Amino acid sequence: HERITRPTNSPEDFSTMMISLSQSRIITQPLSKAVRSRHTVAAATAATRSKKSRATPLAAPLTLTQQSFQNHATSRAFLVLAASSAATLAAYQAAGDHGDDGNLFWKIARCSARNLGAEPVMLSPKTEPATGILFPRLCNGMSLAGCGVRIKWRFVKVYAVGTYLDPLAMSVVKDDEKELKKALLDPNYPRTIRIVMNRNLSIDKYTSAIIEALEPRMAGQDLESLDEFKKMNPPVDLVQGAEMEMTIRGDTLLYKNAVGGLGQIKSIVFTRALCDVYYGEDAVSPSHLEDVIKGVKSL
């Protein structure tokens, strides 16, 4: 136990560890030519066909380069993998996947998934239909509920907008549309509003449009927060594909601008007004709101 849990920081430490494990019978099959060079460790396992037959190594040895051991977690993970049992490696051999060493952990995990009757699944992004802009299914730990387009002057598609919500928080209200709409207007339900530009736009026009939508909804309260919002956007014009994120949690707005800078505004008036901009009766993107209401039900 002490040998397995002790940190290893180099291939030399790892090879010494593996030989020790072999000698102590934690690994039942002997290692052959464990250290070929200063930067390479070769570990091979044998499969016994019968009591009389000799052990035969894998068709292609599992080779790990020094880069694989750059961090402590990787080396310890491989030790646990090697010392656990020969069954996983046997499954790996049976699957016939002997690719490059960089995919070792993925391939063994894939073999395990096959044995359990499952395949790894990667969620595909969602396409906003009017602009073709893709939205990932996850953002800031929340799930995509829906997306839409912001149209100005009836035909100019300015940007695509998507909403990410906490499925657990929305589970209480998602089956009642009236309560769902109230929840979308309540900043105490956490969310991230993600904006992706569909065309080039000056930063002044962008911030002015947001402020013009917010100000009448704030009823003359906390108007200094509008100046704070403007200052969080650097004087760099937006290009097609630029992204902004507005994460709302109660009275706090966490804002990520187009160049990756972060800023924060503490104002319940501001966050409530921002919710009304995107989820109120006069929402700036009706297609976005409609898709969010529809998508929440399937979160």
Image (spheres, rainbow, N blue to C red):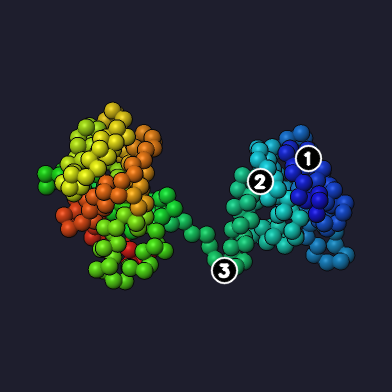
What number is the disc on residue 73?
A: 2
Q: Residue furthest left?
A: 153
Q: Does residue 169 appear to the left or right of 209 in the view shown?
A: right
Q: On the image, numbered disc 3 is attached to which residue?
A: 117
The kind of secondary structure element at disc 3 is loop
State if disc 3 and disc 1 touch (CB < 8 Å). Answer: no
Name the residue type under label 3.
Gly
- Counting residues from the start of the chain, the first of labels 3 and 2 encountered is 2
Q: Residue furthest front?
A: 221
* Quadrant of res 195: top left
Q: Is residue 40 above or below residue 76?
A: above
Find residue 96 and report its horizontal and vertical position in percent: 64, 57
Look at 31% across and 30% down and name the residue there: 234
The kind of secondary structure element at disc 2 is helix
Q: Is residue 147 visible?
A: yes
Q: Residues within 10 Å of mark 3 (few under 14, many from 20)?
A: few
Q: On the image, numbered disc 1 is attached to which residue?
A: 13
Q: Nearer the viewer, residue 38 or 49?
A: 38
